[in-house]
Image (tube, rainbow, N blue to C red):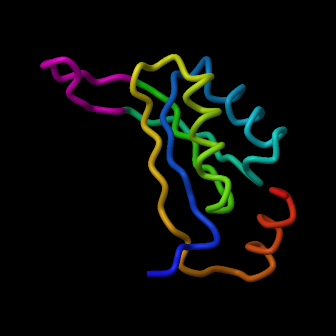
Amino acid sequence: MDLPEYVVVFCTAPAGEAEALARTLVDARLAACVNVTDVRSCYRWEGKVHGEPEQLLIVKTQYRLLDPLVARIKALHSYETPEIIAMPIAGGYAPYLEWIREETT
């Protein structure tokens, strides 16, 4: 299977961290764009079910930048085990995909 050229990365963070994290990723050219939206997460942690308001970062980047992007998120994130999930972009509007490439080089 061929590796994707572009990916969307999902990462949840506390509201106080999400905007700064998004700006850091874009400023470092690890992401072309990061959407930040409010979500409510339900999850199991250390044997208990929790429900918390968080913010979801939707990160658009190149696959080749995934490892440094994950490393940067882990270095800055307050969670012991942050959610960092990458999904391949199978296709899209060619000028937008080209823009992702241009902004992350």
Q: Is residue 72 left or right of residue 98?
A: left
Between residue 74 and residue 16, name the one nearer to us.
74
The quarter of the displayed image where residue 91 is located: bottom right
Tell me which residue sits at (78%, 43%) in the image. Answer: 26
Task: Give the x, y percent position of residue 104.
Answer: 80, 56
Task: Give the x, y percent position of residue 17.
Answer: 62, 21
Q: Residue furthest left?
A: 47
Task: Give the x, y percent position of residue 12.
Answer: 48, 34
The image shows residue 74, relative to residue 30, as above or below, that is above
Asked if residue 45 lies in the magenta stretch, the reply is yes
Quadrant (top left, top right, bottom left, bottom right) of the N terminus: bottom left
Quadrant (top left, top right, bottom left, bottom right) of the C terminus: bottom right
The image shows residue 95, relative to residue 82, as above or below, that is below
Q: What's the magenta region? A: 41-52
Between residue 88 and residue 92, name the one nearer to us.
88
Tell me which residue sits at (44%, 36%) in the image. Answer: 39
Between residue 19 and residue 29, name the one nearer to us.
29
Q: Main secondary structure of the magenta part?
A: strand
